[in-house]
Amino acid sequence: MDGVSFVCTVYNKAGYLPGVIDALARQVPDRPRQFIFIDDGSSDASASVVEQATASWPDMVLVRQSNGGPTAATNAGIALARNTYLKLLGSDDLLAPFCTRVLIETLERTGADAVFSRQDYYHDLRDVAFVEKPVAPRVPDDPLADVIARTVSGTSQTLYRLDAVRRAGACDPGVFAEDFSLALRVASRGRIALLDLVTAAGPADDGERLMVGRKHQTFHDHNLALARFLEQNPATSARLRRLALQRAARRAAKWARREGGHRLPLRYLLLDAAARLGLPIDHARAIRATLSAFALGAAAAARPLVLPQIAAG
């Protein structure tokens, strides 16, 4: 029976980790399992919590490294993985008891290289109630177009075939947040499945979570991942290049309007129009021109955007 390599990246999540680890312990106990925790320079007791809670676990490794961000930590974990399936896990997320099993069944049923299900958010742990139900997966005919159009991403609600991740080159090290660049890379080379089922839940009130307290970083990284993907894949069709620019420009326009106080964010609206009209422009460069939008607003002022040094190269 094919095994699973679980990769959990950890940064200052000591308070969440006992519940996360307890849920992780219940995943596919009938399969070979490898557990990889990457402590990304935590300043709290996260590493000690992991060490104590998993002391009796076989095939378990805890790596402590200097803080490098989610992508650096995830790629460090991927490098150590060796089983057929790769299960990423956020260190404040609870996996449904059936999560990994259902995701594996979906990959085996569809032959896809990755499956993306849904994640929910909770304010009170007592409200978390996962419901397993039969859901037919959707396998897009054009997986890359789907990933671009829907910004398909995520970690805890996903499952990958490890060989597909390795062929894709893992996560783009030039982007701080890891998930969208990985989805783009895998979808450009293989098939994906989408499953309309909640398989994980995270805290809605955690200000350190990218999609809670640092949305400007998340949206910036979605656009940066698109720009870098087009730069690294020059053979990407004009149709998908236009789609990528449209999504990036609209995301920037919405942010500039809502957070930057720009009632008419003309710069980004013009980029959207250029994409729709099919004008002969450098789409990757145009997407890079949207990145400054996410430096606007109170959240960005409080927590400036993080840009890995490699991204400037």
Image (tube, rainbow, N blue to C red):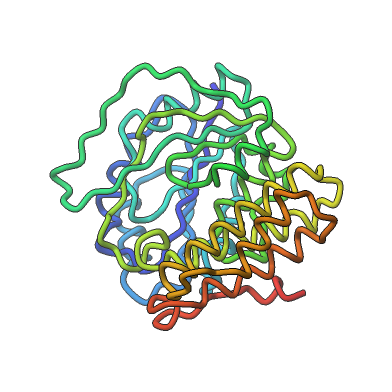
Image side of residue 102 versus residue 106, left or right: left
In this rendered view, identify the residue nearer to me: 93 or 135.
135
Report the residue at 49% width, 46% height from top. Answer: 88
179 up-or-down from 287: above or below: above
In this rendered view, identify the residue nearer to me: 113 or 277.
277
Report the residue at 50% width, 26% height from top. Answer: 104
Give residue 35's position: percent from left, percent from top: 46, 46
If the image is split into quadrants, where does the C terminus sit?
bottom right
Q: Residue extending furthest bottom?
A: 301
Image side of residue 43 versus residue 293, left or right: left
In this rendered view, identify the residue nearer to me: 116 or 75.
116
Q: Residue extending furthest left?
A: 126
Q: Quadrant of residue 48?
A: bottom left
The mark total stands at 0
Give residue 309's position: percent from left, percent from top: 67, 77
If the image is split into quadrants, where does the N terminus sit?
top right
Give residue 91's position: percent from left, percent from top: 38, 55
Image side of residue 19 versus residue 114, left or right: left
Report the residue at 48% width, 73% height from top. Answer: 262
Image side of residue 161 versus residue 202, left or right: right
In this rendered view, identify the residue nearer to me: 275 or 24.
275
178 up-or-down from 266: above or below: above
103 up-or-down from 42: above or below: above
Q: Quadrant of residue 156?
A: top left
